[in-house]
Image: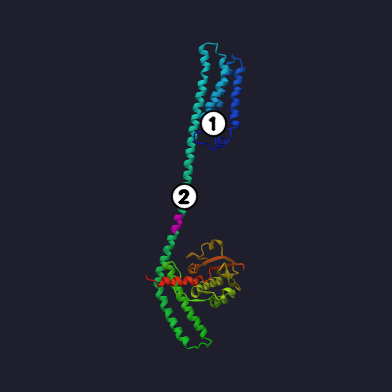
């Protein structure tokens, strides 16, 4: 049987169809056969007539169970009609004998009514329980969703606590880092003055000056990330993309040499002169290159490539290493989520924030070299506009 609807014992598939089908036919034929047996069996065969009167209760009771009150009453009336020809034989006998036979008719109707009423009541209760079950299922699904949201909120709260602890730690060491950097920078400036512009060692002094400035900017970015959740600050220095890539590749060359890895850069002509924030983009690119150097095997290959796509800059660092596992990729830009033993999980998180501050995005994927590919996707000259806007915000009144 199918699901029963409230107010009737008829199953859903039978109520939705044109008729109850073979069930009605089976019960009707049973009633008809019993009526015919009453007619053809002589009145003196009392045992058989008594048996027929008991058998005819079966279609009445089953009709009430299958089709509810209406079915019970309908088949009790059919049984009454089939019983009348047999009852007519006793019309000429004594009243006591006639009434004894006629008593079966109210019993038929009473049985059909009682069984049908019980079946209808059961159907209504079942329908009510099914409705309650559906509501409970919806409540369970809503509770499951809210539980998942609560777990996510708890994770975010734990993340906020970690960031708060990082902010406190960063504030305590900020001066300890910045003051020596300022001293180092001042010392390098004095040394740089001793070498003329054409001196072969002047280039190394200039690199040292730029890198101490970049390191100071990196400290500021970590503090900004921990305290305000935003990387970078105002007054960003802009340089052509080719210069930033060339300098950063030179800085990563030492690490690549230790792994006997090879780094090649391919800056397209349309992106070569594009002005980009030198400190931020250089720090992000250097972080990606150092990660690639750690990932590739001895003698590996790393490629830096830039191009324009849909009016935006694409800068990609690809390698032929083992790639990034799928289970790590979804969380690799979240703070404190590191796939390296002993890693802090801050490098890629800060890099992603820096790119985001330029209105762009840092995306991880698979490289055509067989390893990982981390791509900086941002609008053309987007960082320049972002730097100017942030500069205006920082310069505004508190």
Q: Quadrant of residue 299?
A: bottom right
Residue 27, relative to residue 257: is it above or below? above
| Foreground pick, 176 / 106 | 106
The dot on residue 67 is 1
Determine the residue located farthest toward the left in the rendered image. Answer: 398
Percent from the top left, x then y, of residue 28? 59, 26
The reply to whether dot 1 and dot 2 touch (C-beta < 8 Å) is no
Q: Quadrant of residue 329?
A: bottom right
Percent from the top left, x then y, of residue 332? 51, 64
Identify the residue at image location x=46%, y=41%.
132
Magenta-span inclusion, residue 193: no
Label 2 crowd (10 A; few <14 / some 14-19 / many >=20): few
| Foreground pick, 357 / 324 | 357
Is most of the magenta stretch helix, strand or loop? Answer: helix
Identify the residue at image location x=58%, y=27%.
27
Residue 343, relative to residue 209: is it above or below? above
The dot on residue 142 is 2
Indicate the quadrant containing the N terminus: top left, top right, bottom left or bottom right.
top right
SS type, badge 2: helix
Q: Quadrant of residue 50?
A: top right
């Amino acid at each position: 049987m199918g699901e029963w609807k409230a107010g009737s014992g008829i199953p859903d598939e039978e109520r939705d169809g044109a008729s109850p089908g073979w069930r009605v036919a089976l019960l009707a034929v049973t009633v008809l056969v019993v009526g015919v047996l009453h007619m053809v069996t002589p009145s003196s065969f009392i045992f058989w007539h008594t048996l027929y009167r008991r058998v005819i209760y079966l279609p009445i009771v089953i009709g009430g169970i299958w089709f509810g009150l209406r079915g019970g009453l309908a088949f009790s009336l059919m049984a009454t009609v089939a019983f009348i020809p047999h009852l007519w034989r006793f019309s000429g006998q004594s009243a006591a004998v006639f009434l004894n036979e006629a008593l079966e008719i109210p019993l038929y109707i009473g049985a059909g009514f009682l069984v049908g009423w019980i079946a209808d009541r059961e159907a209504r209760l079942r329908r009510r329980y099914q409705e309650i079950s559906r509501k409970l299922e919806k409540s369970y699904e809503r509770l499951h969703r809210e539980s998942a949201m609560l777990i996510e909120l708890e994770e975010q709260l734990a993340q906020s606590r970690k960031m708060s602890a990082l902010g406190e730690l960063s504030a305590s060491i900020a001066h300890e880092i910045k003051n020596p950097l300022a001293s180092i920078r001042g010392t390098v400036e004095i040394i740089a003055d001793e070498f003329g512009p054409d001196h072969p060692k002047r280039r190394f002094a200039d690199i040292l000056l730029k890198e101490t400035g970049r390191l100071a900017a990196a400290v500021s970015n970590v503090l900004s990330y921990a305290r305000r959740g935003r990387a970078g600050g105002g007054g960003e220095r802009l340089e052509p993309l080719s210069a930033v890539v060339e300098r950063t590749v030179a800085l990563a060359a030492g690490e690549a040499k230790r792994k006997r890895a090879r780094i090649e850069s391919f800056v397209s002509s349309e992106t070569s002169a594009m002005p980009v924030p030198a400190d931020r983009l250089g720090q992000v690119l250097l972080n990606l290159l150092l990660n690639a150097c750690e990932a590739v095997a001895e003698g590996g290959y790393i490629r830096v490539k830039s191009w324009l796509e849909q009016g935006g800059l694409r800068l990609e660092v690809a390698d032929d290493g083992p790639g990034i596992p799928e289970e790590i990729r979804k969380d690799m830009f979240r703070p404190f989520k590191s796939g390296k033993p002993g890693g802090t999980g801050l490098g890629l998180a800060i890099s992603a924030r820096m790119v985001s501050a330029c209105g762009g995005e840092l995306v991880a994927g698979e490289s055509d070299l067989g390893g990982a590919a981390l791509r900086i996707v941002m609008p053309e000259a987007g960082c320049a506009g972002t730097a100017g806007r942030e500069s205006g915000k920082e310069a505004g009144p508190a």
